[in-house]
Amino acid sequence: MDAHPDAPPVVVTDTVRNALCIAALDTRARARGVRLGQSLSDARALAPDLECHATDHERDRALLLTIAAWCERYTPLVALDAAPEAVRDHGLFMDVTGCAHLLGGEAALVADLEARLGAQGFHVRLCLADTPGAAWAMARYGQAHIIAEGGHGEAVLPLSLSGLRLPPALVASLGRVGLKTIGCIAHLPRAPLAARFGARLMQRLDQALGREAEAISPIMPVADLSTERRFAEPIARQEDISQVIAALASGIIEPLERRGLGLRRCRIRLFRVDGHVSGLEVQTARPLRDARTIARLFEERIAGLHDDLDAGFGFDLIRLDVAHADPFEGAQAEMMAGGMGSHAGGHGHDALVDRLGARLGLERVQRFVLADTHIPERSFGREPVAASHPGARRAASGAAALALLPDLPTPDAIITRPLILFDRPEMLQTIAEVPDGPPLKFRWRGVSYEVARSEGPERIACEWWRDGRGARTRDYFRVEDSQGYRFWLFRHGLYGRETGEPAWYMHGLFA
């Protein structure tokens, strides 16, 4: 803004107690006497040419989340400062414990963070301290960028009480009795202060001075394992990115082996030099510990994107995170190359599931499973293949799958079911010799059929615990018409006991 001296001063307004007040302002507005919290009418009196913009909290939060994702290049523990008493002056907390040495120390980390955000067009105020409360206060009301270890208690004493993240009304109340800085209350008797101004005041003081621990809640879950590669010169070619992913995957295998784990879900984070962060995630159908397979899954994932991976001016950091891992069950390898054992076949099945999952999403690769019910249209369902037990995924036949579920029809009974089963039975018009006997003729989808042979009934009782007491019994018949077509239809309701006029339905077709 300073590059355009003729531009009018700019402010951002927000509604406070039904009045428009100044929430943010630039240097030109500050030079004209405008200040934060001032009403818009008073500000216009000082600067009639003031350019005003309304606060958009949703877009501000989205921008803050974008910056938070970018800050994960320094530490995975990045949290939003969303305390309601902070007067909507949100920021970020970063726990860099054990991370500073990766960038050459705390001073180098702070300088790098400030320089990179400044290059992206942001004006930032930051401070590194022992406690979140002290860092928050110094970043907003102090001057130091780094507080020496153990020095946060003395450093925050001269600062305003607003640095304790207190509501403005409470700060004003304390000011009316002459308490304006943190040092004014640091050594006063605690009981009278808590009795008059509330326990929240003492809690915020203790958090700033380190007397009470304060945890932050990271935006993203912390990965079980993580490995990364930084580049002096950004990379943008797809081949280079694939090679880096393969190298990172190789580096994660040894830690997985030491822990006896296999990868189930992992993600790649690609940090662009302009601040944009891209993320790709893959899941596996079984615990995986093979670097080449992991790299191929990410290649499939990238190939399945609707748009090419936008590298912009290049990526200067790529990180591989293991988001979830399960115990890895080792197995004896085949002694003969090209063996057709069940173990090899299982791995081939799982590899196919993994590749399809990388392209389509693992939750979309599904299998049919039997359900504990005797109503035909409810007797099966679908579930993601990766959600089932590995032993169930490699069931060799329908009979083996039936053994996993108790009290289900035997395979001989399953054979009598039609090849095509309708999701919803379709109503028929029928002529029967007796009300509770098989049909002689029926009309379905506008076509009349004459029954040549019939077999049944197979009676299936209702499930009153699901459908209620008014549910009806079904009598199923397998019928064949004069041209050899075979149908599966049922009479809905027992004649004379459940209904006086049973309805007929077509439910399936035999081959």
Image (spheres, rainbow, N blue to C red):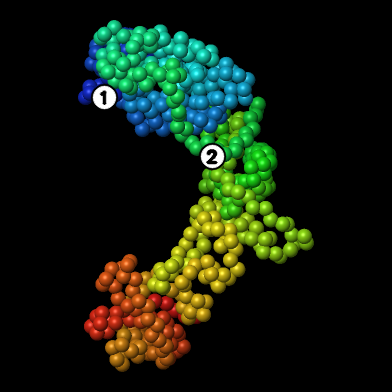
Instruction: Compare marks 2 and 1 and give the one earlier in the sequence.
Output: 1
Residue 486 visible to an observer of this rendering: yes
Out of 8 and 388, give the one closest to the viewer: 388
Q: Identify which residue, 417 or 310, lies in the foreground.
A: 417
**Residue farthest along the left direction in this orientation:** 18
Q: Position of residue 292 (x, y in %)?
A: 68, 47
Using the image, determine if residue 2 lies above or below residue 326: above
Residue 62 vs 489, above or below: the answer is: above
Give the structural element (helix, strand or loop) at label 2: strand
Which numbered circle lies on residue 294?
none
- Please name the residue shown 59% across and 53% down the image: 286
Q: Is residue 423 left or right of residue 410?
A: left
Disc 2 marks a residue whose amino acid type is Gly
Q: Callout 2: few (<14), some (14-19), or many (20+) C-alpha neighbours within 10 Å?
A: few
Q: Report the side of 413 relative to 250 (left or right).
A: left
User: Amino acid under label 1?
Assistant: Thr
Q: Residue at x 52, y 47 (%)?
A: 306
Helix, strand or loop under label 1: strand
Real-space Cα distance between discs 2 and 1?
A: 37 Å
Q: Could you say which quadrant of the image residue 347 lies in? A: bottom right
Quadrant housing the N terminus: top left
Q: Nearer the viewer, residue 161 or 303?
A: 161
Front residue of 329/37: it is 329
- Residue 197 location in percent, x, y? 28, 17
Q: Residue at x 50, y 65 (%)?
A: 368
| Residue 181 makes an appearance in the image | no
Determine the residue located farthest toward the right in the rendered image. Answer: 336
Q: x, y (%) of residue 334? A: 74, 59
Q: Position of residue 111 (x, y in %)?
A: 55, 17
- Give the residue number, with chain letter if any, for mark 1: 15
Q: Which mark is residue 279?
A: 2
Quarter of image, res 391: bottom right
